Amino acid sequence: MSVEPRLHPLVEPLTWDSAFFGYDVGALSLDNTADRSAIRNALGPPDNARYRLIVVSHPSDRADLRQAVADAGGQLVDVKFDYRTDVPNGSDWPEHVDALTAAATSAEVQALNALALISGEHSRFRIDPRIGHDNWSRLYRLWVENSLSGAIADIVLVHRAEDRITGFVTIKARDEQARIGLIAVDPAFQGSGVGRALITAAHAWAARQRLANIFVATQQDNIGACRFYARMGFSLATQTDIHHLWTIS
């Protein structure tokens, strides 16, 4: 007996997220070929039965998909802006910026943890109250830890002033591209050139690695970050809606 092919997208398990949160999390990534009926099929039983949370993403210019996900019970928690810029040749290394490793002191790690929470203020993990503050803060602390260890970042750069860390950025290289994971500036030093120094250092590092582009994602609601990246020469590459659909009350 032949088996009919599945004509709708599948919810894929997010293994790491499931282990971290302690419940099954899945992801449904929709492209411009998706239609409303495909979403209804994918998000209805039996596909959603095993997941407590399904993260649904699709291009932001598809208002019909946004409505279809909302009709299925999804909540829009993020409009992700992904920015891109070319790596300039011959970028000089800025003053007051150096690399931090897994040998960082407890005080340095504590400073990075505090800054990481600032960077995540507009994230979907912070916005969705069902994630919970403890999980959100634990996630960003782990992000810092795994960046310093080299598990998810190739380098962690910090800016220092007045005998303290005033900003940091994490970078991961893949193929010919560099991606910024976390970037944050101490509020007391915002507007003083710390962010510009960190991006300049990221350019210099990427140039030394012979990379062509740098990407960084932020949220549409993070207006300050969007304006900053525009001033630094980044252009908007993609715009993606992200929804959380909780299947269990």
Image (cartoon, grey):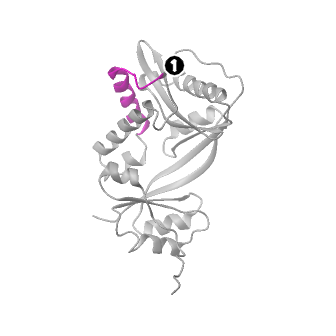
Q: Main secondary structure of the magenta part?
A: helix
**Amino acid type at mark 1:** Asp
**Residue 113 covered by magenta stretch:** yes
Residue shown at 44% from the left, 66% from the top: 70
Residue 180 on image: x %, y %: 54, 36
Q: Nearer the viewer, residue 151 or 203?
A: 151
Which of the 4 quarters of the picture holds residue 93?
Answer: top right
Residue 54 on image: x %, y %: 40, 61
Label 1's element? strand
Residue lying farthest to the top in this orientation: 162
Q: Is residue 135 above or below residue 189?
A: below
Residue shown at 35% from the left, 70% from the top: 49
Q: Nearer the viewer, residue 163 or 20?
A: 20
**Residue 30 covered by magenta stretch:** no
Residue shown at 34% from the left, 59% from the top: 24
Residue lying farthest to the front in this orientation: 1
Residue shown at 33% from the left, 62% from the top: 52
Label 1 sits on residue: 98
Residue 235 on image: x %, y %: 65, 41
Q: Which residues are magenta?
A: 100-120
